[in-house]
Amino acid sequence: MPSKFQTGHIPSSHVKTPDGSGIRIFHEVKGGRLSECTLAPGLTSSSISHRSVEEIWFFTEGSGLVWRQQGYMKETVKVGTGVPLTIPKHTKFQFRNTG
């Protein structure tokens, strides 16, 4: 059976998440969702990981650092406007808004 069409409006406010960032969910479908996440300048999120969710991030403004670790593989990358990255399942991650 096909999915239902969705049309909506961007929520006016962000909901606080367990890692300390704010999120606005635009739409959810089976297997994914589109949302906007914000973190105030100078703040760092808590380190978390997702057991059942994979994420694709795209930075629309600002600059910062994203730390990711999966087993022995880990890295910290500089991010800014126009940068995409992925957060696979079971990856520990944390992000900082540097400006």
Image (cartoon, helix red, strand yellow):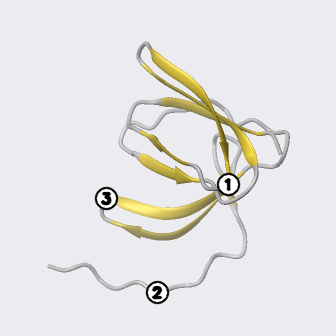
Q: Residue at x 45, y 43 (%)?
A: 86
The residue wearing badge 3 is 31
Tell me which corner region of the image, top left, top right, bottom left or bottom right, holds residue 59: bottom right
Q: Which mark is residue 81?
A: 1
Q: Position of residue 35 (x, y in %)?
A: 55, 63
Mark 1 residue type: Thr
84 relative position to 79: left or right: left
Percent position (x, y) of residue 22?
A: 69, 54
* Amino acid found under the numbered disc labelled 3: Gly
Name the outermost residue toward the front. Answer: 82
Q: Are marks 2 and 3 in contact (CB under 8 Å)?
A: no
Question: From mark 1 to mark 2, how far is it between C-alphas?
Answer: 27 Å
The reply to whether discs 1 and 2 touch (Cβ–Cβ < 8 Å) is: no
Q: Which residue is mark 2?
A: 7
Q: Extreme top residue here?
A: 72
Where disc 3 sits, the SS reads loop
In which quarter of the view is residue 94 placed? top right
Quadrant in which residue 61 is drawn = bottom right
User: Mark 1 or mark 3, which is nearer to you?
Assistant: 1
Q: Earlier in the sequence, mark 1 or mark 3?
A: 3
Amino acid marked by disc 2? Thr
Q: Quadrant of the C terminus?
A: top right
- Of label 2 and label 3, which has the lower sequence position? 2
Please tell me how crowded label 2 is: few (under 14), some (14-19), or many (20+) other residues with Cα within 10 Å.
few
